[in-house]
Image (cartoon, rainbow, N blue to C red):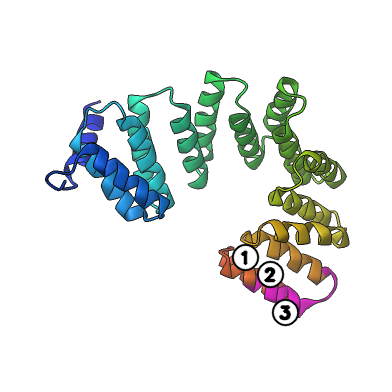
Amino acid sequence: MKKIFITILLLWVIVPVAVGDSYYQWVDSADIYIEREEWERAEVALLNALRAEPANAQNSLLLSNLGTVQRYNGKYQEALKTYSMALFMTPRSTTLLRNRAALYAEMDSLELAAADYSHLILLDDTDEDALYNRALIYMQQGDTVACRKDLEYMLRQNPASSMARMGFATYFKAQGFYYEAVEMYNQVLRDNPDMPYLYIGRAEAYILWGKASLADKDIERAMQLSTNDPFVYILRAYVKIARYEYRDAIADIELARQLGYDARTCDNLINEITKE
């Protein structure tokens, strides 16, 4: 217990506060920097606000924002400590639990992420976001029984749940039941026709199913809705590979790389193509 308080005190002491700057001035500055995505400046402003009024009742919210700023800045360990400090102050905060669970998942700490999602479900057993994410974690861990149990529970709670159907689409795709996956995507798309990731998911199911030609329209639609997802260019590359359009496929893989897709995966795909 003492270690936690010592850590908090150190956090608030290490950042100098300019004379005359108030708690709310620092908070306002942090909001401006966050809007500009200037993460380093936002972090300093939030730390200065915390030091200015360490007993302010809003500090749990500020710590939540600070953790998110650190996460966006790639400071995962710092973000984890910050979220945990905030949860020590407000242990039933669903926002903090959700943020920390997402961070754990991003850090590949799936057991800890699942634990936070389970805590959220204990607080509210109708929390679809927590159930959906826990189901996907179970699937990643190879526990298909627990995954399906969460998804079926979601549908019992809400028979119209698009999130449950998206989960089942991913589940069926991972199990090799591509027809069933496509059917689930079809159901969700009827009510959500402007979500690019649904077209991307269905296109992937078509490609895995060996029906690359059926993926064309979905890839085109996903690109119309959003051109920033690198995976859509990987999918288009697979369609072009199926048509023996190797040069165009390599160009799409390079586009995916430029948009942030894993470089090693891109190299492996290009190496496979050049062997043809």
Residue appearing at x 82%, y 39% in the figure: 187
* Location of mark 2 (residue): 269
Residue type for callout 1: Thr
Q: Which residue is mark 1?
A: 265
- In this view, the residue farthest toward the left is 19
Pointers 2 and 1 in contact (C-beta within 8 Å): yes
Q: Position of residue 151 (x, y in %)?
A: 71, 30
Q: Is residue 132 above or below residue 253?
A: above
Number of residues whose C-alpha sits closer than 10 Å to that of mark 3, classed few (under 14), some (14–19) or many (20 or more): few
Badge 1 density bin: few <14, some 14–19, many ≥20, Cα 10 Å: few
User: Is residue 59 located in the magenta-colored stretch of the structure?
Assistant: no
Task: Locate residue 251 relative to residue 215 in the image: left or right.
Answer: left
Magenta stretch: dominant secondary structure: helix
Name the image quarter holding the C terminus: bottom right
Secondary structure of the residue carrying numbered label 1: helix
Identify the element where label 2 is drawn.
helix
Q: Earlier in the sequence, mark 1 or mark 3?
A: 1
Question: Where in the figure is residue 223, as x and y percent of width and height?
Answer: 71, 61
